[in-house]
Image: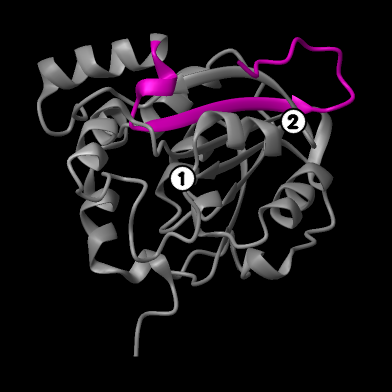
Amino acid sequence: MPPNNIQSHSDFEPVEQIPLNKHSIYSKVDKMIEGMNVGSVLEVGCGSGRYLEHLKELGWQITGIDIQNKGKDFIHIIDVENGFELGQKFDLILACEVIEHIIDTEYFLENLSKHLKENGRLIISTPNLLFWVNRFVMLAGFKPFFAYADFHVRMFIWKELSKKLLRYFSIETIKGSHIGIGRNRNLIVGTLASYIGDFLPKLSAHFIVQLRPLDQNMDQITS
C-alpha cells in the first residue's frame, strides 16, 4: 500500500536533511520573520518539527500539525484536509509546501484564517508551475519540475494562487525560492539564484508569500 503521509515518501528524506540555513524555503522564512516580535507559532505540515525546534530556540512558543508524529509532544496528528480546530489563535502560521497537497484549498485557507491573530502573519509556500525552466521543459513535452509530482493534487500559477489567497488575506510580500538551484547544491551559484528569486518570484521555482488578515488596510499584490 502507498504511504499514508507524504512526509514518509522517500523523495522527502533528503529535504529533511538539508541544513536550514541552506534550505530554499526555510532560509527565506527566517529572513521574513526577523523583525517580528516573538510569540506563538503554528506550522501546518511540520514534518519532523525541526524548523519549529529552531524557532523555539529563538523564543517562540511552538505548535505543529502533521498527519504523523515522530515522537514530538508539540505536534498534533491531524489531517488538515478535514479541517482543524486547536482552540487558540497564533501570531505566526507557516504552511510551507502544503497547499499543493490539499484538494479543498478554500476550506484549508479558511481554517488558517480562523487560527491567525488580528495582527498575525501567515507565510505560505508552494511550487510555481510557471518556473522559467518549466516553461521550456513543458514546451518540449516534458513534465515540469517541482510542481508536478504524484503526491501533489494541485499546481499553481501566481494569478490563480493570488486569487485564492486574497479571499481570506492581504498579501504583504511575495518572494521566490531560487531561479535555478538551491544553496544546498552549490553555495555560490545557489546564493545568486536565491537572490535573483526575490526580485523575480513569478519566474522562481517556488512562491513564498507573506500575508496578514484580510481586514487590515494593506495594498494588494495581484499583478
Q: Amino acid at mark 2?
A: Leu
Q: Residue at x 34, y 17 (%)?
A: 197
Report if residue 223 is visible in the image. Answer: yes
The spot of residue 198 in percent (x, y) is 40, 13
User: Residue 53 has which mark?
Assistant: 1
Query: What residue is at 71 percent from the left and 70 percent from the top?
Result: 82
| Residue 41 location, quadrant | top right
Which part of the image, by quadrant, shows the N terminus? bottom left
Q: Mark 2 and mark 1 in contact (Cβ < 8 Å)?
A: no
Left or right of 67 on screen, residue 130: left
Give the class, few, some or many, for how many residues have Cα within 10 Å of label 2's Cα (few <14, many ≥20): some
Badge number at residue 166: 2
Q: If you read the primary sequence from the N terminus, does the residue marked by circle 1 or circle 2 appear first?
A: 1
Between 156 and 43, the residue placed more toward the observer is 156
Residue 102 drawn in magenta: no
Magenta segment boundaries in residue numbering: 200-223
Tell me if 24 is positioned left or right of 109 in this view: left
The percent coordinates of residue 77 (x first, y second) are: 59, 71
Position of the C terminus, as image quadrant, is top right
Spatial CA distance of label 1 from label 2 is: 30 Å
Where residue 138 appears, as percent x and y from the top left, is: 26, 41
Q: Is residue 123 visible?
A: no
User: SS for tag 1?
Assistant: helix
Furthest residue to the right? 215
